[in-house]
Amino acid sequence: MARKRTQDLTKGEITPLLKNMTIPMIWGMFSVISISAADTFFIAQLGTLPLAAISFTFPVVMTLGNLTIGLGTGTTSLLSRVIGTGDDLRTRRIATDSLVLAVLIVSVLSFIGYHTIDPLFTMLGADQYTLPLIREYMEIWYIAMVFLVVPMVGNSIIRSTGDTKTPSRIMMMAALINLILDPILIFGLLGFPELGIKGAAIGTAVSRATTLCASLYILQKKGLLCRHLDLHEILASWKRILHVGLPAASTKVIIPFAGGIIIAILARFGTEAVAAFGVVGRVQSFAMIVFIALSSALNPMIGQNYGAKKMDRVKEILKVSYRFSWFLGISLACVLFAFAEPIVRIFDDNPEVVRIGGIYLRIVPFSYLCTGMLMISSTTFNALGRPLPAVAVSLIRMFGLYVPLAYIGGEIIGARGVFYGAFIGNVTASIIARLWIHRTLKKLL
């Protein structure tokens, strides 16, 4: 039964299979990131102050979004390993229980977040001018948070079955709706009131609501949902999901949390520095699309093969993935170095924003080769059901290297020194991760 609903990733040539899994995810990830990029682009037309305000929201939005990604990672890891064993009943049980867990978590987080907007963003460095704009955006974002969380977990379930095309179509539909609604609601077109930054939040909420309906429909159509709930089974599933999900979420949360600290460091150099960091953050998100897509494809591939006890195949999957990431990282760095200022100018033509953003894009992208290796290694740890090494490497990267080096660099040479901290953190952490995953696989053979 399980095999009828899922694609068997334990057979066939690895390179074509990985390609077929990754390409749909590239379009899906492009769509997800384009939602935030569209918000940034249209809000930037309102001025540097609204752009700075939306930049302040990035770490918080990313933190909560990455918590969900961590939950989805735990679900994908467990489901793919179970699918590898051919247990159909357990597959449906875990899929259903993961959605129930997502609803519970989002209810708690949205309540807390809604009631802590002012103190949190004040702590991050928002002032009397940006805070009201931040509040307009985040109040709606928190209310609509369920539209983000549940579909992300649902799409993770679908990907676990080896189907990456359907989640990508769902995400592309959401991106299109958001792209249409953003200018209408932000600038008050076609008879709608001009809502400014609040319009961007509403547009995002509506687009995410479509993904909720679509993902639940697909899950039901694929027969991946149980019609009854059993408390004992639910708790057992939650324990197994959170075994990977909590550490994976912690790994994902570490990055935007550290990003909040970096924003506080950059705030000392002015609003333009914060705005520039927001712009290059969006550029970097697009640059990382293929790496993210590859990692999303690797989780079910490695999970299913590990569940089927095909470790030689797991090693080959990793070898192919590393080679591709090296080529892609070098290519991206060269392109961003050559067109640094023009790329930043697309979002904001403020000369100081362009200057600072250009500095970032001429330094940090040369560590993307290592960032790709790091993402692949972290995904492999999670897929194997061993998430703690990924957490350890992420902590070393962000708080052992990036944050302290960024602070020191900022004190010595300004914003440029902050960006060198990012470069060194990425390179060093990737080396550690690569050596660690090699040791782990050697023990499992």
Image: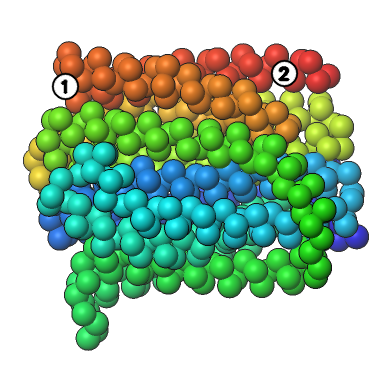
**Residue 343 in view (yes/no):** no
The structure's colour scheme is: rainbow
Quick one: SS at disc 2? Answer: helix
Q: Whole-percent x and y of residue 104?
A: 60, 57
Structural distance between the alpha carbons of marks 1 and 2: 40 Å
* Residue depicted at x 87% and y 56%: 88
Q: Is residue 172 left or right of residue 60?
A: right
For residue 380, above or below residue 117: above
Q: Whole-percent x and y of residue 197?
A: 24, 63
Q: Which label is found at residue 93?
A: none
For residue 357, above or below residue 52: above
CB within 8 Å, label 1 to label 2: no
* Residue depicted at x 89% and y 49%: 86
Rendering quarter of residue 300 = top right
Question: Which one is nearer the viewer's eye here, 143 or 440?
Answer: 143
Q: Badge 1 is on which residue?
A: 414
For residue 76, above or below residue 154: above
Question: Which one is nearer the viewer's eye here, 111 or 132?
Answer: 111
Question: Which one is nearer the viewer's eye here, 35 or 154?
Answer: 154
* Residue depicted at x 42% and y 16%: 400
Residue type at the position of mark 2: Thr
Question: Please, which residue is most extreme toward the bottom here?
Answer: 191
Rendering quarter of residue 199 = bottom left
Q: Badge 2 is on which residue?
A: 440
Q: Whole-percent x and y of residue 100?
A: 67, 59
Quick one: SS at disc 1? Answer: loop
| Quarter of the image with the C terminus in it | top right
For residue 74, above or below residue 388: below
**Residue 210 in view (yes/no):** yes
Residue type at the position of mark 1: Gly
* Residue depicted at x 56% and y 39%: 249
